[in-house]
Amino acid sequence: MTSAMPKRQEIDVQLTWNTDLLFPSPENYKENLVAYAEQVAAFESNFKGKLADKGIIVAALTEYEKIVILDSRLSHYAFLPLEVDKMNTELASLANEYDLVSAKARPQRDFLYSELGQLDEAFLLELKEEQLQWAAFFDAILRDKPHQLHPLQEELLSNFAPTFGQPYNNYGVTKFEDMTFDNFEANGETLGNSYVLFENDYELSHDTEIRRNSAAGFYSTLKKYKNTTAATYLSHIKNEQIEARLRGFDSTIDFLLHSQNVSRDLFDRQIDVIMKELAPHMRRYVKLVAKAHGLDKITHADLKISLPSEYNQRITPEESKQFLIDCLGILGEDYVKMIEQSFDERWIDFAQNEGKATGGFCATLYDGPSYILLSWTGLMNEVLVLAHELGHAGHFQLAKKQSVLSYDPSLYFIEAPSTANEVLTCNTLLKNNQDPGFQAYLISELISRTYFHNMVTHLLEAAFQREVYTRLDNEEYLNGDILCQIKLDVIKKFWGEDFEIGDDAGLIWMRQPHYYIGLYPYTYSAGLTIGTAMAKQLEENPEEVVEKWLETLSLGASLSAQDLAKHAGVDVSTDQPLKETIAYVGSLVDKLEQLI
């Protein structure tokens, strides 16, 4: 038997998201694209070179908000359909039309930042006090001011923005258009392989032959594209390094952290403390799971499995709706209505099909839905992914209380609401079912999905990034083999000597698109640190904490990441929340040892 992914057109429409909520037709989208281009041209004509008077600045920002909101709608309509059907040339053509308009519009818009940055600091502070709805926007202008270039240089960089974004596009082409995976044999059957099948199913399979054989085939294909993918990634980070130096930063890492408004200390702390203190708990956990599966050895292909259990049953997307409402209902009526709306209005793409992007994400329109991408397996792991993405949806739907210019919080905080939902879901289930078998199963799922994914997988990516950027700034030579060795060393350091980490594990860096989004990977562990603390508070004192938590989510970017966490009741200025989170994982492993 050979399993094959269905084509997009073969998928039941109820398992797909509804992008008609953005524009009712491609024709309407194109009409709005023309209107957007005209709107941006008028904005440039009306305001460029004139931002010296407070009244004119307020008028410009009011108009700019409208431009940003329309651009968001257009970009999502252009690219969301392509995310689920990457080989569709008609959809690619629609996306290309947006790219062409956006490339011209960017410098016509971006003069706003450059001209405001040239203004006197005292004047900007006055504006901030008078226009509080844009306070965070003005804070960002003031923070960027020391690193601002001459307006002509800023305009030149803005014109080159599409070129700077090309490495990420090239990565996607290699991954989704060029890579094809051979079938593999397991248990006397021939099975198809792909990014989606491997990452969403085979890698987590409790069938050792399927898991290990699929991994061997998967990495065999990745290896063929190692050097091309390395060249793509290295071109991206060299672009970042050039801009960092132009703007006067001491290092590329400092440049990337600046956009998050996060200190180097917080970044290094997440990596160093987790590498040292979480690793022993995770080694203990994996050994418990391996013993339960009767494994003869523990290879890298075995690290992500959970305990074997009769409770490991698949559920349908429709069943997951009530399941998550029951678990997250503590967050209030409006939050439950948001979950219902996401199902009823088809914000969620559950389908598994050929040409679909891997992983999961949530993309929210300021004036519209929160689109969630999944590849639904129905296993508890996937249910937790959905809880995670609904956390992002709830966050950004609430953040709409802010101006669109003060909407996106620091990446350091961005994963807190999503990971809090994962922990809250599992803790609710644990409280409601005291059966030892179920408790063991769910604790295993919580560790293997929530903590493994966010505090091991992504944290090891962060450690890899730190080493790569350090070598880059030290002007050391980098290529595909060196990147693989860096990744392999990081993985081996975390897991120690008792695991058989083969050379193929070094190829894992090739799987992660987050490397093209700055220093994103470490923020998962930062968010989970806040999320774990919040889940505990929500359980222990919901009457007081729920309202405060939802209020924090509604603040958007109006506070820094540290202040947002503090507003919610978590002080990340010290390492205590992180150490408490690690201790909590240790307590879960302790309990698992008692249960099995």
Image (cartoon, rainbow, N blue to C red):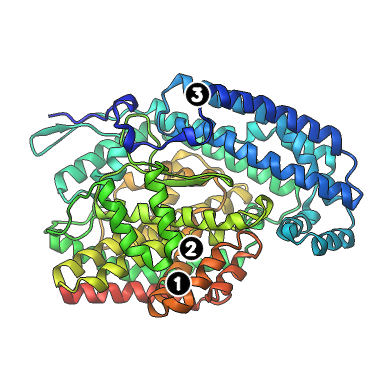
Distance in Å between CA atoms under marks 3 and 2: 34 Å
SS of the residue at dot 1? helix
For mark 2, what is the residue?
416
Within 10 angstroms of label 1, few (less than 14), some, or many (20 or more) residues?
many
- Of the numbered discs 1 and 2, the one sitting upstream in the chain is 2
Residue at 49% over, 64% down: 526
Within 10 angstroms of label 3, few (less than 14), some, or many (20 or more) residues?
some
SS of the residue at dot 3? helix
Distance in Å between CA atoms under marks 1 and 2: 9 Å
| Amino acid on which the number 3 mark rests in the picture | Ala
Q: Quadrant of residue 286?
A: bottom left
Q: Is residue 585 above or below residue 224?
A: below
Where is residue 377? Give x, y as percent: 26, 45
Tag 1 and tag 2, C-beta contact below 8 Å: yes
Distance in Å between CA atoms under marks 1 and 3: 41 Å
Where is residue 72? Give x, y as percent: 60, 39
Question: For this rendering, which residue is in front, 206 or 359?
Answer: 359
